[in-house]
Image (cartoon, helix red, strand yellow):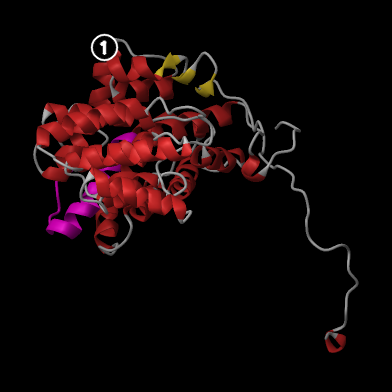
Amino acid sequence: MSEKKSGGGLAGVTAGETAICTVGKEGAGLTYRGYDITDLADQGSFEEVAYLLHYGKLPTAAELDGYRSRLRGLRGLPEELKALLETIPAGTHPMDVMRTGCSYLGNLEPEGDFSNQLNVADRLVAVFPSILLYWHRFHTDGKRIDVETADDSVAGHFLHLLHDRPPSESHRSALDTSLILYAEHEFNASTFTARVITATLSDFHSAITGAIGALRGPLHGGANEAAMELIEKFSDPESAASGVRGMLERKEKIMGFGHRVYTTSDPRNAYNKRMSKKLSEETGDTWMYAVSEAIEKVMWDEKRLFANADFFSASTYHFMGIPTYLFTPIFVCSRVTGWSAHIMEQRANNRLIRPGADYTGPSLQEWVALGERA
């Protein structure tokens, strides 16, 4: 770790090396293993990105077919896990369901020797939508759904389980692109959590479970849910603009804008905004996209804060019929690929992550006997 002293939250500290991702790097921007996010989002599929992150290269056509077939075969849930999911209360936050499901799966299917790590990584990519949506459908519809669909893509599989039918191509494509955009982002809070856990030589499921816990917070993964709650407060662009100005005057926190690393724009936002606009037109929406645009404009005009990846992903998911409380778990279904890549990279050249701290407590004090304390 760099010796440079940081501000709060380790800002400005280099905490390690990675060959997986660049974020905000001049001349590179956001890349996964050297591939620009625009090329991956425009031309790739989420399965190609998952393969790239896990195996270190883009798959050939034959490898991609085999990989998709492999993931389809890994979607099933053990009966013990289904039983557990049925006992988790309906009012539980789905991120807690994901955390518990991952941890319990680690008991049923322990990683064992670290040589099994690629199998665990692929299993989690395949099974996370099944865990989430088995629980969701059981508690909302009272159905024990079959989680082994024939859909070729993770996006199609997710939407099929959610709506009980194969999705339209526009919805499948939009979710696929969203999964690509969220797959990896260097040493963000949840990824760094996974690496810290991994550095202790803990198991794969523990590292992923910890990462899910870090992603649950509204300052990291939960921002898209908060963005949706904000958007739904307003009925038209005019009320949105005046309402957000009022929030700014009252110094209220507005989620979905600015970024810890990016300084001028988030390269993922353009895709989410474009997808939101397209789906709004398909669904005949007359207000949500317009309200979102109005909020974006006020935030830029008043604060020079740009929309990040979370803001327009909220309305994009809404237009696909995805309940708000499932937004952040979708992030998990995507980012598990990046987490897995970082776990494997940390193991390949491991050193315990143990930073120091500047002590700010009292100076050395003398012990006072119990009866003499004021």
Say which residue appears at 64% left-offset and 29% top-offset: 16
User: In the displayed image of the protein, which residue is found farthest to the bottom?
Assistant: 371
Frontmost residue, 138 versus 32: 32
Dominant SS of magenta comes to helix
Residue 103, given in percent of the width and then of the height, sits at: 41, 50
Q: Relative to residue 361, is residue 225 depicted above or below?
A: above
Start and end of the magenta stretch?
Answer: 125-148
Residue 292 placement, left or right of 15: left
The answer to which quarter of the image holds residue 158 is top left
**Magenta region includes residue 254:** no
Res. 187 in view: yes
Quadrant of the frame with the C terminus? bottom right
Res. 225 in view: no
Quadrant of the frame with the N terminus? top right
Dot 1 corresponds to which residue?
A: 62
Say which residue appears at 35% left-offset and 22% top-offset: 49
Frontmost residue, 168 versus 312: 312
Say which residue appears at 35% left-offset and 34% top-offset: 334
The answer to which quarter of the image holds residue 6 is top right
Please give the count of numbered marks on the rendered protein: 1
Q: Relative to residue 331, is residue 181 depicted above or below?
A: above
Residue 235, given in percent of the width and then of the height, sits at: 20, 50
